Image (tube, rainbow, N blue to C red):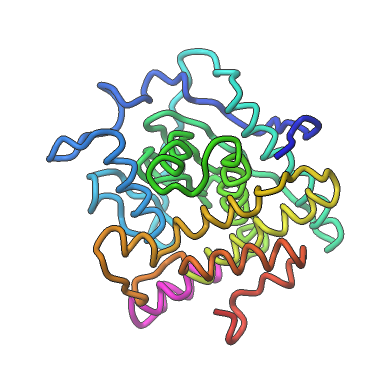
Amino acid sequence: MRMDDMPESGNVEDRRGDGGGGFGGGGMPMGAGGLGIGGIIVLGLIGWALGIDPRLLIGGAEILTGGGQPQMQQPSRPTSAPINDDMSRFVRQVLGSTEVQWKDIFQKEGQTYRAPKLVMFAGQTRSACGLAQSAMGPFYCPNDREVYLDTAFFNELERRFRGCSGKACQFAQAYVIAHEVGHHVQNLLGILPKVQQAQQQASSKAESNRLQVRVELQADCFAGVWANHAEAQKSFLDPGDVDAALQTASAIGDDTLQRKAQGTVVPESFTHGSAEQRKRWFMTGFREGTLKACNTFAAGAI
C-alpha cells in the first residue's frame, strides 16, 4: 500500500498521551480472572464483531449503537503532546483519503460531505456514547459523529486472528478505518437513524440482529467504494493488499469468531455478517464504486 502522496487529515485527535489512558492503574479494568491485555482485547474483538455488550465479557462501559439515551460525557483532555509517530501519520493519511473520496462522491450526488473526527487513544477515553475502552474495538459514535480507535486493535488482529502480516496489514488496517467511516456515511445519509428506529420496533432480537447485519455489510461495501475511488485516483494498492483486507474481513466474520469462541455457529445471533458476506460486500463496493451498489437492505441482498 503506497501512502506517500496521500493527504493527511486535520481531523485526527491523538489522545494517546492522555494521563487517563493506557493499560496501567488508570486504564482498562482487569477481569475477575486476571485477564491480560491480550485476553481482554481478544474478548473485545469478539464482542465488537458479534455485537455482544462488552460488559458481559470484561465489565466495560456500554457503547450505544442505537436506541436508548446518549450519555453525554465530556472527552478527557490530553496531558501531554500527541505522539507524532508512523501510526498517527498512517491514520491521518487513511482518514484524509476517505475525506477526499467521500467529498467527491457526495458532490456528484448533489450532497455535502461533513467529515468525522477520528480519536486515537490508549486504553480508554471519553466519548459522547460513554466510556470508550480498547476492548470494545474500533467504533463509530453517532452521538458525536466521531470514530474511536485504539491502535492496539491492529496488533491483536494481526497476532491472534492472523488476518494479515507485516506490511500487508496496512490495507487491512485501512479497511477497518474505512468501515467505521462507512458508518459515518450511513449517518449522514440518514440510514442509521432509520435502522435504529426499526430495531426499536423489531419483534425479536433475531430481527434486530438481521437489521444490524445489513448495516455492517453496507459499511463493508462503503469501505470498498472508498478503495475503488482511491485506487482510481492514486493507484495506491500493491499486489496482495486486497487479499489481506479480505482475509481480515473473513477473520472477523461472525461465523469465524463464533466458531473460535464456542465451537458452534448461531446465524440468528449474527450482527456483522458471515465471513463470506463480509468479503462479498467489500468486493461489491470495490468493483462497482457506487453508493447504489451497496443497497444491503434490498430484498434478497443477503
Taking the view exactly as shown, the residue that stands out farthest to the top is 80
Query: Considering depth in this image, is 254 or 8 the residue closer to the camera?
Result: 254
Up/down of 81 relative to 114, above or below: above
Taking the view exactly as shown, the residue that stands out farthest to the bottom is 299
Taking the view exactly as shown, the residue that stands out farthest to the left is 33
**Residue 252 at x, y = what percent?**
44, 56
Name the residue at 46% across, 69% down: 274
Name the residue at 32% across, 63% down: 258
**Residue 142 at x, y = what percent?**
53, 52
Left or right? Give the position of 155 relative to 106: left
Up/down of 112 relative to 194, above or below: above
Query: Considering depth in this image, is 72 or 258 the residue closer to the camera?
Result: 258
Left or right? Give the position of 259 relative to 301: left
Left or right? Give the position of 273 relative to 257: right
Query: Considering depth in this image, is 110 or 297 the residue closer to the camera?
Result: 297
Residue 198 in magenta stretch:
yes
Which quarter of the rendering shows the C terminus? bottom right
Which quarter of the rendering shows the N terminus? top right
Up/down of 237 relative to 193, above or below: above
**Residue 38 at x, y = what percent?**
31, 37
Instruction: Look at the image and give the residue range highlighted in magenta.
Output: 193-212
Name the residue at 74% across, 45% down: 237
Name the residue at 33% across, 45% down: 42
Left or right? Give the position of 178 relative to 23: right
Number of numbered discs:
0
Q: Report which quarter residue 27 is drawn in.
A: top left
Residue 14 in magenta stretch:
no
Query: Considering depth in this image, is 166 or 254 the residue closer to the camera?
Result: 166
